[in-house]
Image (spheres, rainbow, N blue to C red):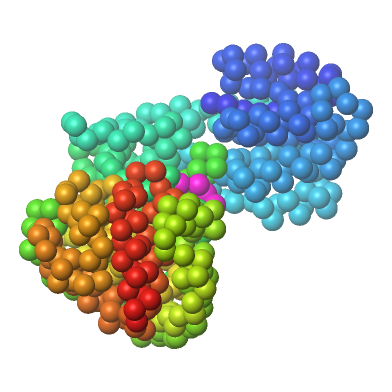
Amino acid sequence: MKVLIVEDNLRNIQELTQTVVSAFPAGDVVIKQSRDTALAALQNETFDLIILDRKIPTSDGAMDDDVAHGETVYGFIKAEIMGTPVRFWTAFPDDDYYNNKMADVLQEDIWGTGVRQTVGIIRKGRFDQIRETIGEVKAALDTLDMIELRHRPGKAVELNYLEKRILKVFAKRVGGTAVEAMALSGGLSDAKVLRVAVFAGANQIHLTVGKLTTIRELSEELKRYQHFVRLLPGAAPAIVCQVRTGAGRYGGTFYQLAAGHEKSLFAELTNNPKSGGKLVAEIRKKVGPWLSNAEERKITIAELRRSFVSDDIFKIVSDALPGQNLTQFESHLITLKICCCHGDLHGENVLFDDNQNPILIDFGEAGVGCAAIDPLTLELSAIFHPNGMLKTMKWPSASQAKHWVDVNLYLKDCPYPSYVNACRDWAYEVAHGNRAIYAIAYAYLVKQFKYRDTDKEIAKALIEAVVTAYAKT
């Protein structure tokens, strides 16, 4: 447990030290006396409760105490760590300021032990109420620690203490006594996507996909999920709950996973390489409704590429390919078919059951985009994703990659020809034309230079292939 109290009155600090800080283990409760020291603490540590006096100075010992400085601290909390409970330490709990702050209140089961308000008030002088509030937090965390976090032999996933807490909060909320997590997607972002099973005694009561990331990203993903996921029934799992509180700036979204949907597309292809065409066809059916409202839009290739990655990464690629004149290439105007799309449809974001029925997960990049980006991502992620089945193979070589446009030459000795063919056919059928295919593939490939562990030589060879082909159309 870690609690931050922000208070500059020396008499109050003495009383807090004697009656509150001393009541808990050393280091559990810390006191900061100014805006700057409070902000530094909030940036460097994660707290389970913040007790905030509004009228504080800018720095320790300064004589410029003002309510604006407390408001600055609260502004940081609201913007960056909105999942952390706050109690205003005030002599005036009924003024307009606090009434306005009540609009920020979330009614949340913060630690899985009952619904609490995220924003509240403690009257000045009520040291006993501060101690009682902190005691409630400690008791809730102690109860949470009783949830068993387990893993199967040889399948442990590395989690920090906040990620473990998110899993335990979820398990506690749904009535579990133990939770098991296994890595489901080791993608290129910092988010963790896990297969999460919750148990009550010997019985499994929930099987979910859990995505652990920042609360800000979770909020954005929820908006995208609600707005863009217009798929056929069963194509996307329902959200069980979001954990938005209790772990600082981090949280989790948990999607209900039907029994059997445990194999990723990459895993399914590894076990059955010849099934690629059928698997891609099933995925295509699921996202078919998105294409029904497609419209055409003209943009430059530079604008398209910027929707994937910044100019800083473009410069790295341009410097690595001095003979391609990518600036001139990016100046061309192209016509794209635009519709709803997943936006990150790699092989770990599609799960299959034993009957090869797919569901899609992870909607953090879902939105309006190029219709062909999903099939092209599906094809090329087999090469660039950390779990892609082609990543550790010798195919394609850099010289083979230069034949990407000519599928017949490109697929020579390919271990998964039906998969690549199905992805490419899908891309060509939903794109406006060949130039759109080359431009979208180019933007995806430039993005690979953003990541440390992608094969840059293959990426460069593929970029050369699409840029050369574009010039010939």
Q: Position of residue 265 (x, y in %)?
A: 20, 58
| Residue displayed at 18% across by 66% down | 410
Could you say which is closer to the camera, residue 466 or residue 349? 466
Q: Which x, y percent locates residue 56?
A: 83, 33
Q: Quadrant location of residue 168? A: top left
Q: Quadrant of the C terminus?
A: bottom left
Is 300 on the left-hand or right-hand side of 93? left
For residue 428, above or below residue 81: below
**Residue 452 place in picture, x, y as percent:** 39, 43
What residue is drawn where x is 14% and y is 72%? 408
Residue 51 at least partly seen: no
**Residue at x-position 77% and y-position 48%:** 98
Q: Is residue 211 left or right of residue 23?
A: left
- Nearer to the camera, 198 or 133: 198
- At a point 46% along the width and 35% down the height, the residue shown is 162
Q: Which residues are magenta?
A: 212-216
Q: Position of residue 404 (x, y in %)?
A: 24, 67
Q: Main secondary structure of the magenta part?
A: strand
Tell me where residue 67 sits by quadrant. top right
Horizontal side, residue 48 vs residue 452: left or right: right
